[in-house]
Amino acid sequence: SSAASDVYKRQEGSTAEKTYLVIDSYGNYAVYRQGAPVLEAGTCAQKSGELYTLTPAEGVPRDGVYTQSAVYLPSLENGELLTFNKLGDTPAFLGVEAPENFP
């Protein structure tokens, strides 16, 4: 089963307050910063339990943990573990165009 449609917001760091993770019910995901081009987009698939593999269109696949209230995901830039807290159940792109992989 794939993750439900959700939108998450990153909590810590100077640029983090405007960084969002969106996952839809088709297994697409995107990371974006409000008002900026999408940072990353690709697909996610359940590996086991709360462990998911996120595969960006460009870059190396990595595993993240998906819970009811948050997603924990290593940064593509430096491998730092990022925490995205759940905002809602509707995938939303605020101040940015949805990437092509989203229906």
Image (tube, helix red, strand yellow):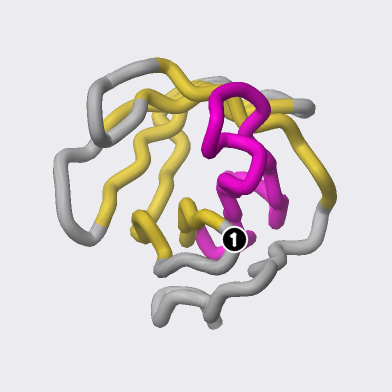
The x, y position of residue 45, in whole percent, is 42, 44
Q: Residue furthest front?
A: 14
The x, y position of residue 81, in whole percent, is 42, 17
The x, y position of residue 17, in whole percent, is 66, 38
The stretch drawn in magenta includes residue 8: yes
Q: Quadrant of residue 96?
A: bottom right
Residue at the location (47% across, 66% down)? Answer: 36
Q: Which corner quadrant holds the C terminus?
A: bottom right
Taking 68 as reference, is 33 above or below it?
below
Residue at the location (42% across, 64% down)? Answer: 38
Query: Which is nearer the eye, 79 or 25?
Result: 79
> In the drawing, does residue 51 fall left or right of residue 94?
left
The residue range painted magenta reads 1-27
The stretch drawn in magenta includes residue 74: no
Crowding at dot 1, Cα within 10 Å, few <14 / some 14-19 / many 20+, comes out as some
Taking 4 as reference, is 73 above or below it?
above
Residue beneath disc 1:
34
Tally the marks.
1
Query: Which is nearer the eye, 94 or 4?
Result: 94
